[in-house]
Image: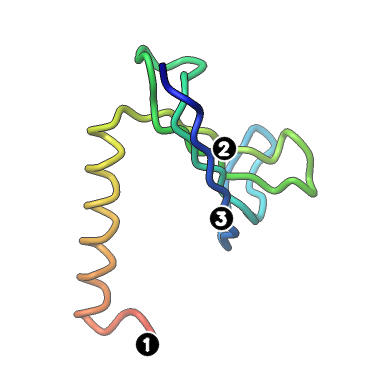
Amino acid sequence: MCTMIVEKVKIDGSGKGTQGWFPLQQANVSYDHPFDAPYEHALNIDFVNEAQGPSARVAVELSESAARELVRTILAVLDQAESGGHLAK
């Protein structure tokens, strides 16, 4: 039996939903039963702007291996950007 795990983090960015682009303020990251993905459990990420209501939400459900690969890829891209002088320190 798996207990739902949830972490919330403040973020700064933009997301595109059914109404177009909107500013993102928070990401809710959980490990739980997905709504749609064909897995018993998934890493679920909801990018949200709660001030704009439920339509200001972008959701993803990832397998454990896909989530880990995404994290590795994000870090690799940021490392390349930093070593290329594209990121301000």
Q: Earlier in the sequence, mark 3 or mark 2?
A: 3
Q: Residues within 10 Å of mark 3 (few under 14, many from 20)?
A: few
Give coordinates of residue 52: x percent, y percent.
78, 45
Q: Residue at x 22, y 52 (%)?
A: 72
Front position in the image: 68 or 17: 68
- Which residue is under mark 2? 58
Name the image quarter holding residue 66: top left
Tell me the distance, in whole angstroms, between the alpha carbons under discs 1 and 3: 22 Å
Horizontally, residue 63 falls left or right of residue 35, namely left
Tell me the distance, in whole angstroms, between the alpha carbons under discs 1 and 2: 29 Å
Three-letter code for the amino acid on which mark 2 is drawn: Val
Q: In the rendered image of this protein, does residue 18 appear above or below residue 23?
A: above
Give coordinates of residue 37: x percent, y percent.
40, 17
Q: Residues within 10 Å of mark 1 (few under 14, many from 20)?
A: few
Give the quarter of the figure containing the C terminus.
bottom left
Give coordinates of residue 20: x percent, y percent.
65, 42
Q: Under tag 1, what secondary structure?
A: loop
Front position in the image: 20 or 8: 8
Three-letter code for the amino acid on which mark 1 is drawn: Lys
Front position in the image: 17 or 25: 25
Q: Residue 89, which numbered label? A: 1
- Which residue is under mark 3? 9
Q: In the rendered image of this protein, does residue 61 appear above or below residue 45?
A: above
Q: Earlier in the sequence, mark 1 or mark 2?
A: 2
Front position in the image: 3 or 8: 3
